[in-house]
Amino acid sequence: MNKPENLPFPKILVFNTTSRDQTSVALIVKGKVKKLVAPVKAQELQKLTDQLLQLAKISMTEIDAVAVLTGPGSYTGTRMGVTAANTLGWLLNKPIIELEGDSLDTALDFLKKTPPKPVGQAKARY
């Protein structure tokens, strides 16, 4: 298992928009997780992300990678999360990490235990 200080990406922003009933954003900073889960649709991803970064006192440019859950899940919601991750990764020149599934907690456990492998562009799975 990686020690938090040996993670290849010390600050990872994670999006989960696979559910129709809620949207989740998490921030892993040196192995510690902060997350926001709200009963809102994926259209609120930007607001949740801004709130989480403000709570963590981290600017968007300080993150080291962007991760996104790629589904299965809501067709439109999953595409919105993947598009947001791809766009943010491209704008900030940060690696993008695909996480299969629809459970934020499972994805966060996976990220803490397994060295993530960045992809050029995330793709949604329905």
Image (cartoon, rainbow, N blue to C red):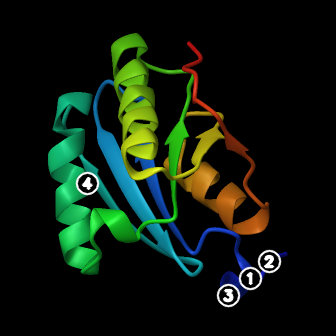
Q: Are marks 1 and 2 in contact (CB under 8 Å)?
A: yes
What residue sits 36% from the left and 44% below the top? 91
Query: Are there few (<14), some (14-19), or many (20+) residues within 10 Å of tag 2?
Result: few
The residue type indicated by label 4 comes to Thr
Q: Read off the residue under disc 3.
A: 5
CB within 8 Å, label 1 to label 4: no
Q: Given the image, on which type of amino acid does mark 1 rest?
A: Asn
**Residue 56 found in image quarter:** bottom left
The residue where tag 2 is placed is 2
**First in residue order: circle 1 vs circle 4:** 1
Q: Give the residue type at disc 2.
A: Asn
Alpha carbon separation for disc pair 1 and 2: 6 Å
Element under label 4? helix
Callout 3–callout 2 Cβ contact below 8 Å = no
* Residue behind mark 4: 49
Q: Nearer the viewer, mark 1 or mark 4?
A: 1
Query: What amino acid does circle 3 point to?
Result: Glu
What quarter of the picture does the C terminus occupy?
Answer: top right
Circle 1 residue: 6
Q: Going 62% across and 51% down the picture, which residue do you hit?
A: 106
**For residue 77, what is the image quadrant?**
top left
